[in-house]
Image (tube, helix red, strand yellow):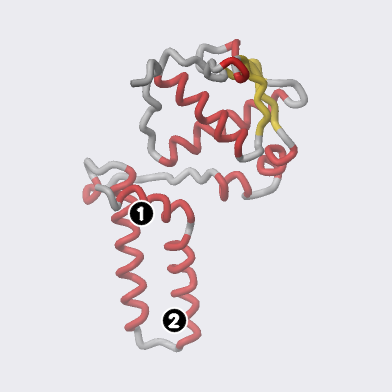
Amino acid sequence: MTPYPDILVRAYSQINKDRRTFLEMAYQCFPDTVDCSITQLFNWESSEGRTAIFDLYYLESAGYIEIVAQGRKFGIPPTPYAYILTKAGIDILEKPGELDRLFPIIPFTHHSSTEGLNDSEILKEIINTLERLRSMVHDMEIPDSEKNGMLYYINALLAHPSLQRCTDTTDDL
């Protein structure tokens, strides 16, 4: 059993919001580093702090930030005390649409049919609806060029990595 608190369970859109926040903080500070000691957010003693540290290391492994940490060489969990945006991090923030592509925020409007459902259940419902729509389009008596155009967009939505991750996690429900 680990002496550290569990990482928070978050919806995919919340994970992306949190990671975008860290990238935006680094962008605002650039070329200086973000000082992690100015906030209690980055600590091992709370689930929130552990989750924030997890997000920073995720962003570093993706090449978007560089972390300066304590304890890497002594068997102590590495605690970030500063981080800075890399060229790749700057690129995703400045290239139009790139941040939304890599860290999409999927807004949900809860209608009566989805009341009480969590984000992954709603996404699963959307995926099922898109699959039914795809089947309906196949059966429509319209020119093939129109049918193929509609199917292209439906298949593109179904193949989006955000929905693929959703189906990977909701299959276990």
Choose top left, top right, bottom left or bottom right for residue 118: top left
Of discs 1 and 2, which sits in the foreground?
1
Badge 2 marks a residue whose secondary structure is helix
Residue highlighted by disc 1: 167
How far apart are the two marked residues, 1 and 2, measured between alpha carbons?
A: 26 Å
Q: Position of 153 compared to 3: left or right? A: right
Q: Image point 50% across, 17% down: which residue?
A: 41
Q: Earlier in the sequence, mark 1 or mark 2?
A: 2
Q: Position of 25 compared to 41: left or right? A: right
Q: Label 2 near label 1: C-beta < 8 Å? A: no
Along the line of sight, the residue nearer the viewer: 79 or 161: 79
Q: Position of 102 compared to 10: left or right? A: right
Choose top left, top right, bottom left or bottom right for residue 70: top right
Q: Percent from the top left, x then y, of residue 50?
A: 46, 22
Amino acid residing under circle 2: Lys
Residues packed near mark 1 inside 10 Å, few (<14), some (14 to 19) or many (20 plus): some
Amino acid residing under circle 1: Thr
Q: Compared to 142, does 93 lie above or below?
A: above
Residue highlighted by disc 2: 147
Residues packed near mark 2 inside 10 Å, few (<14), some (14 to 19) or many (20 plus): some
Q: Which mark is residue 105?
A: none
Q: Residue furthest right?
A: 31
Q: Percent from the top left, x then y, of residue 108?
A: 37, 45
Q: Compared to 148, does 46 lie above or below?
A: above
Badge 1 marks a residue whose secondary structure is helix
Q: Image point 77% across, 25% down: which residue?
A: 31
Along the line of sight, the residue nearer the viewer: 105 or 48: 48
